Image (cartoon, rainbow, N blue to C red):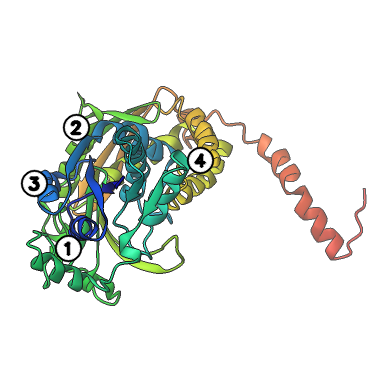
């Protein structure tokens, strides 16, 4: 009996070539599968292209709501920014796609799941570790690690030879990955880290220099760490992120040009656009500073970094991730309130913070006559707080302590 192969299909250069290549190299039925995470025009004509290039069946799953509510919101509540900057749009989407692929493979009785990740990329790790964890009995194929093509240019030649329509062109061979949480752009001239990214590398954000001359003020209301209102209007999760992408994009918010450490040990240069993610992470972080007590806030910074590393490294379904998210969820019980931000030419300024759970006490913080802080108590506090270091200094300098 011929193998049945589930192909993670995006319609981009690699997976378009892969479907045709697999259909010619393997005696098996190929089912092209795509998860809609909000990648817009990449979905246009996808079924026709998949069937034309060798697939016997095409399945498209609308995962946008699940992506935002079960994956993006978790990363947002955790404050997960890889290496302190990257909101990880691609990395957050991969475990959901791995889950989708295993579910469809089980429904279709497939023996193999094939993906279009390269041998030195992050996504091969994210997909395969996720699939191994969720369906350890399914075989995984990665043609890009074994086939004869050595470059994207060779793939494009193959695509042209077999009449496979692809978006990438020889004079602008970017690899673009898009979902609701952000866009990742790599390859081509971007591989030269000494030059700035060309303007055509950016897809959804205005150049900050060309953004409107007037700032735009927005308010975001959170409930238990999750954004639910923008400018006083209640949005469903998918629409909320889409709306903030539009608002941020027209103000030049969310552009990133990063050198990052890949899972496999090499450094890569990536261009990202994530207007909504940057706005929401800024607002959420500011709300946490207002509400969380000092020790929880400090400890959560370490947890945020660890959660980001786990997501980036493809360990979403690991026991440690689940355990850390239990901690994160407990910290979000009181993260309810409103943040007002000003957006101007790529910059974000916090204008206002408000919450019924705020730990900010004006009477304690003020230097006016309304001050209620007990200044006399500080003397004893400082003596005890600094006592270990005073004692150490006395010992090191062989100073005798007298009564």
Horizontal side of residue 367 vs 402, given as left or right: left
Number of on-image labels = 4
- In space, the residues marked 3 and 4 are separated at their CA atoms by 39 Å
Mark 2 or mark 1, earlier in chain: 1
Q: Which residue is mark 4?
A: 321
Q: Secondary structure at mark 4?
A: helix
- Residue at position x 25%, y 35% from top? 63
Horizontal side of residue 41 vs 108, given as left or right: left
Mark 4 or mark 2, earlier in chain: 2
Q: Is residue 32 above or below residue 64?
A: below
Q: Is residue 235 above or below residue 323?
A: above
- In space, the residues marked 4 and 1 are separated at their CA atoms by 33 Å
Cβ atoms under marks 1 and 3 closer than 8 Å: no
Mark 4 or mark 1, earlier in chain: 1
- In space, the residues marked 3 and 2 are separated at their CA atoms by 28 Å
Quarter of the image containing the N terminus?
top left
Q: Residue 371: x and y, percent? A: 51, 30
Q: Which residue is mark 1?
A: 201
Cβ atoms under marks 3 and 2 closer than 8 Å: no
- Residue at position x 27%, y 74% from top? 150
Say the numbered circle drawn on residue 239.
Answer: 2
The reply to whether residue 282 is visible in this rendering is no
Mark 3 or mark 4, earlier in chain: 3
Q: Which residue is mark 3?
A: 48
Q: Secondary structure at mark 1?
A: helix
Q: Nearer the viewer, mark 4 or mark 1?
A: 4
Horizontal side of residue 137 vs 380, given as left or right: left
Sort mark 2 into few (<14), some (14-19) or many (20+) by Cα contacts within 10 Å. Answer: some
Q: Residue 290: x and y, percent? A: 44, 34
In front of the other: 170 or 24: 24
- Residue at position x 45%, y 49% from top? 129
Q: Secondary structure at mark 2?
A: helix
């Amino acid at each position: 009996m011929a193998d049945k192969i589930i192909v993670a299909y995006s319609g981009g250069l690699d997976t378009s070539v892969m479907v045709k290549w697999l259909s010619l190299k393997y005696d098996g039925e190929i089912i092209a599968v795509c998860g809609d995470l909000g990648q817009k025009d990449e979905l246009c004509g996808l079924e026709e292209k998949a069937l034309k290039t060798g697939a016997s069946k095409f399945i498209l799953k609308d995962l946008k709501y699940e992506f935002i509510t079960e994956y993006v919101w978790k990363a947002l509540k955790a404050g997960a920014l890889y290496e302190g900057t990257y909101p990880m749009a691609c990395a957050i989407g991969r475990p959901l796609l791995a889950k989708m692929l295993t579910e469809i493979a089980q429904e279709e009785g497939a023996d193999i799941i094939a993906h279009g990740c390269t041998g030195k990329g992050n996504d091969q790790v994210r997909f395969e570790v996720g699939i191994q964890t969720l369906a350890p009995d399914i075989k995984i194929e990665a043609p890009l690690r074994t086939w004869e093509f050595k470059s994207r240019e060779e793939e494009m030649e193959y695509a042209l030879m077999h009449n496979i329509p692809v978006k990438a062109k020889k004079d602008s061979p970017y690899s673009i990955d898009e979902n609701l949480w952000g866009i990742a752009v790599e390859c081509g001239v971007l591989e030269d880290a000494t030059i700035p990214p060309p303007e055509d590398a950016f897809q959804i954000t205005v150049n900050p220099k060309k953004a409107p001359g007037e700032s735009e003020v927005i308010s975001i209301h959170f409930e238990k760490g999750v954004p639910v209102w923008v400018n006083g209007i209640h949005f469903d999760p998918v629409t909320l992120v889409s709306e903030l992408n539009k608002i941020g994009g027209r103000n030049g918010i969310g552009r990133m040009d990063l050198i990052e450490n890949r899972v496999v040990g090499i450094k890569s240069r990536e261009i990202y656009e994530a207007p909504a993610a940057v706005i929401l992470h800024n607002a959420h972080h500011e709300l946490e500073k207002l509400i969380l007590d000092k020790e929880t806030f400090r400890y959560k910074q370490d947890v945020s970094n660890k959660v980001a590393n786990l997501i980036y490294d493809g360990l979403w379904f690991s026991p440690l991730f689940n355990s850390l998210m239990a901690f994160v969820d407990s910290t979000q019980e009181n993260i309810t309130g409103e943040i007002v931000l000003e957006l101007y030419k790529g910059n974000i300024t916090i204008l206002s913070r408000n919450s019924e759970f705020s730990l900010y006490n004006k009477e304690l913080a003020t230097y006016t006559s309304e001050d209620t802080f007990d200044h006399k108590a500080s003397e004893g506090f400082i003596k005890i707080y600094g006592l270990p270091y005073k004692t150490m200094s006395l010992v090191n300098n062989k100073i005798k302590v007298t009564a």
